[in-house]
Image (cartoon, rainbow, N blue to C red):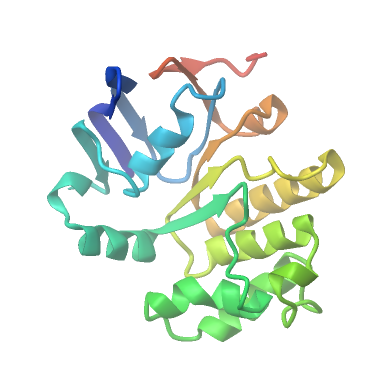
């Protein structure tokens, strides 16, 4: 089992008292699976993704990555686990403005101490169709190009797990379709486990499993989800 949760809960304190964002969740994801998490805005999808990635801490319960409990790790150890095993794609791209496309893609590999970061980054930029744009900065790229850089960055170092939060949410439908195809093509090539939050049901249906989040509760959904 690559990813597992045990009675995972998230509660936040508000001015009106405790607010339960996630009800107890038991989830198991095998290596190589593609999983979509769907649900209304505010249902807890992104919170769950942050907990799975070790970017946030659960109130109760555990997340296990390859049988390693994230709750047993300190922040530095969780950061190392993310660097070694995890790639991220966000709706807002989150590229570093002062770095070129090539430097943005290289960054995670360099931080993780991987050798050959530049060579791998160049190869990935070629795969996403940006071999002629590697020296451009984010403000010189279109939204679709920025997200392609972000996808290349996510795959650098060949992570075991890719977390994607609304990866096509900021793109028009035509550009989104191209980015979507690229994401699944690269995911297949690299054999990565993909866990994606999306409101796009067409995109969700391309995944092997669909999980529906409603008011903090998670349940398996059919591929006929509306």
Q: Quadrant of residue 82?
A: bottom left
Q: Can residue 22 be seen from the camera position used here? A: no
Q: Quadrant of residue 58?
A: top left
Residue 162 at x, y = what percent?
49, 51
Quarter that holds the C terminus: top right
Instruction: Decide if residue 60 is on the left or right side of residue 123.
Output: left
Residue at horizontal 55 percent and vertical 42 percent from the top = 165
In the rendered image, the residue lying farthest to the right is 174
Residue 176 at x, y = what percent?
77, 44
Residue at horizontal 32 percent and vertical 44 percent from the top = 56
Residue at horizontal 65 percent and vertical 71 percent from the top = 124
The front one of 190 and 150 is 150
Question: How many numbered dots are placed on residues in this image?
Answer: 0
In the rendered image, the residue lying farthest to the left is 72
Residue 107 at x, y = what percent?
50, 75
Figure check: 40 above or below 115: above
The front one of 106 and 18 is 18
Instruction: Decide if residue 53 is on the left or right side of residue 212.
Output: left
Figure check: 79 above or below 14: below
Instruction: Decide if residue 3 is on the left or right side of residue 142.
Output: left
Residue at horizontal 68 percent and vertical 33 percent from the top = 203
Residue 62 at x, y = what percent?
20, 36
Quarter that holds the N terminus: top left
The front one of 16 and 112 is 16
Q: Can residue 7 be seen from the camera position used here? A: yes
The front one of 27 and 54 is 54
């Amino acid at each position: 089992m690559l990813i597992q949760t045990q009675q995972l809960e998230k509660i936040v304190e508000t001015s009106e008292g405790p607010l339960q964002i996630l009800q107890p969740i038991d989830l198991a994801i095998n290596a190589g699976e593609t999983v979509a998490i769907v649900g209304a805005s505010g249902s807890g999808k992104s919170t769950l993704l942050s907990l799975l990635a070790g970017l946030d801490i659960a109130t109760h319960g555990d997340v296990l990555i390859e049988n390693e409990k994230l709750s047993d790790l300190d922040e530095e150890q969780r950061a190392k686990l993310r660097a070694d095993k995890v790639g991220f794609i966000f709706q807002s791209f989150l590229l570093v403005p002062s770095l070129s496309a090539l430097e943005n893609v290289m960054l995670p590999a360099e931080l993780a101490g991987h050798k050959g970061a530049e060579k791998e980054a160049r190869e990935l930029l070629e795969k996403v169709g940006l071999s002629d744009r590697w020296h451009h900065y984010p403000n010189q790229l279109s939204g679709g190009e920025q997200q392609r850089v972000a996808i290349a960055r996510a795959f650098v170092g060949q992570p075991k797990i890719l977390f994607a939060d609304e990866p096509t949410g900021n793109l028009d439908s035509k550009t989104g379709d191209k980015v979507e195809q690229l994401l699944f093509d690269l995911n297949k090539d690299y054999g990565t486990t993909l866990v994606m939050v999306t409101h796009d049901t067409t995109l969700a249906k391309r995944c092997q499993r669909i999980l529906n989040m409603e008011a903090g509760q998670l349940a398996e959904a059919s591929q006929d989800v509306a």
